[in-house]
Image (spheres, coloured by chain):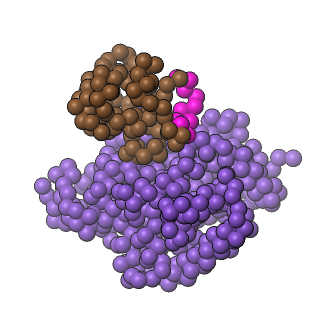
Chain colours: A purple, B brown
Amino acid sequence: MVLIDEMSLPELPVELPEFQSDPMPFVERAREQHPWLARFSQGYIVHGYEAVKDLAFMDDKLEMGLAHVVEFYGVQGSQWARFMLEMLQSHTGVEHTRIRASVAQAFTPRRANQVRPVMRRVIGELLDDWAPRGNFDFAEFASYFPIAVLCGVLGVSTEGIPRIRNAIETHMASLTLDKAVYPGFLEAFDLLWGYVDELVSEREQAGADDENALLDALIAARDAGKLNDIELRDMVLVLLIAGYDTSKNMLTFTLYRLLERPDDYRRCAQEPEFCARVIEEALRHSSIATVFRNVTQDFDYQGHSFSRGTMVAFAMPLANRDPAAFPDPLAFSPERESENRHLAFGRGEHICLGQFLARAQLEEGLHLITQRLHHPQLDGEIAWRPFLGAWGLRSLPLRFDVSA
Amino acid sequence: MVRIIYKETDGTEHPVDVAEGTSLMQAAVDNGLPVIIGECGGQMACGTCLVYVDEDWEAQTGEPSEMEEATLELHEDNPHPRKRLSCQLKASPELEGLVVHLPESMY
């Protein structure tokens, strides 16, 4: 066994703009030195498909590594830190199961299918509003979609979205490990917490009991002693945050990939089943999430020793482009047949709770967008998001023709 | 130990001795059997441990819970009448000799 701290490993400069816009030349060079492991400024990055898959199942040895993020900014003791360390993803085992169970029923494939009409209505209304402009930043357009669907799932009004959109962005930016975002994310968190607290209080006072409203179900779970007051609010906030950056970045990435494939784009307008294939390949080809883990007990994996306290990042965008798992990984091929399935939603205990909701809204969104916006063309410079956390395009200016 | 037989669509049988209380998904994964994936580790959150149970065994395997049914909807295009998530089938003496059928593929 070799301690990874003593190994000669390649370094991935994840902070560089060149890495953000095209990580693959860096990763290909790193792979020549080590097939699946590299260093970055704050710890280690696992970028091989099999290794990410195997390690993601080791929930007993690798917990969510948000304590490293809190320490990085030196904000132990803040309300933000409490949230980061106590929310769903930071729990494991029995506690994790208890908290996740309070919302799991709202995220099954059945519920995702039931919410499809809400998804179609939301994207339809957005298109009514935005399409007549003839050009817009698709990333901004997309930012209003998944969160409005999530408000539908929770059973709350979408009126608050403009108020919290920027705050969610700012909070999420904390995961990029860039000191420039401090202390903005602490202020953003206070705003978000105030918003969620208001939502819960209003709902309690109204005594609402809508069986399709997840917020009412969560309040009922709290009343039944399954969650406490703080956990209830943490959960609402987790859902708003998790449902925002991820799906909007995936949708924007998908549109970007389809700009080079006009035939596929047109086919998406005709065939919902083909949209599903395109989305699945987009999740593989252009995954967005890099997640942090903290090693909670020493362990060995494939001749490598990981010591307690080490920070490990699982880079899904890189693992899903591992040529050992996906031949010709940089080709965007909706028709791809593969033995392996991408890791976009993770594996193990922390597998994405919203994966079926995400897939359904990406499919519905793509189908309606391709029906309404014709011949999309780039209309300016794209801009990239930081690689860590939720990668993707910060800006995708498009012009297009609109149906009469 | 409980003897469970996992049967592929081509008829290949994989007999496995499963410890009481262990899920049939976990036993399949631990023994490197094909098709069964178990992406979520057994919390009904992925639907990738689908199996079919013969009618004769329905009494012993019991009914799927509402949550399991809701997750099985992932496979709604698959018309098989007795679909189960193998993470919800735990080895017990009543299941000695149970045959579970593996689907052609999971996705």
Task: Based on the picture, tell me whether residue B73 belongs to the magenta stretch.
Answer: yes
Quadrant containing the N terminus of chain A is: bottom left
Residue in the image at 72% along x and 46% along y: A117
Question: In the rendered image of this protein, does residue A304 appear above or below residue A333?
Answer: below
Outermost residue to the top = B11
Left or right: A348 in relation to A44: right
Q: Is residue A316 magenta?
A: no
Depth order, front residue of A303/A386: A303
Q: Nearer the viewer, residue B9 or A39?
A: B9
* In-image side of A102 versus B61 (left or right): right
| Residue A102 point in image, percent of width and height | 51, 56
Outermost residue toward the front in this view: A224
The residue under the point 70% across, 62% down is A208
Residue A42 visible from this viewpoint = yes
The answer to whether residue A8 is left or right of residue B5 is left
Q: Quick check: A141 left or right of B39?
A: right
Q: Which residues make up the magenta segment?
A: B69-80
Q: Residue furthest left?
A: A1
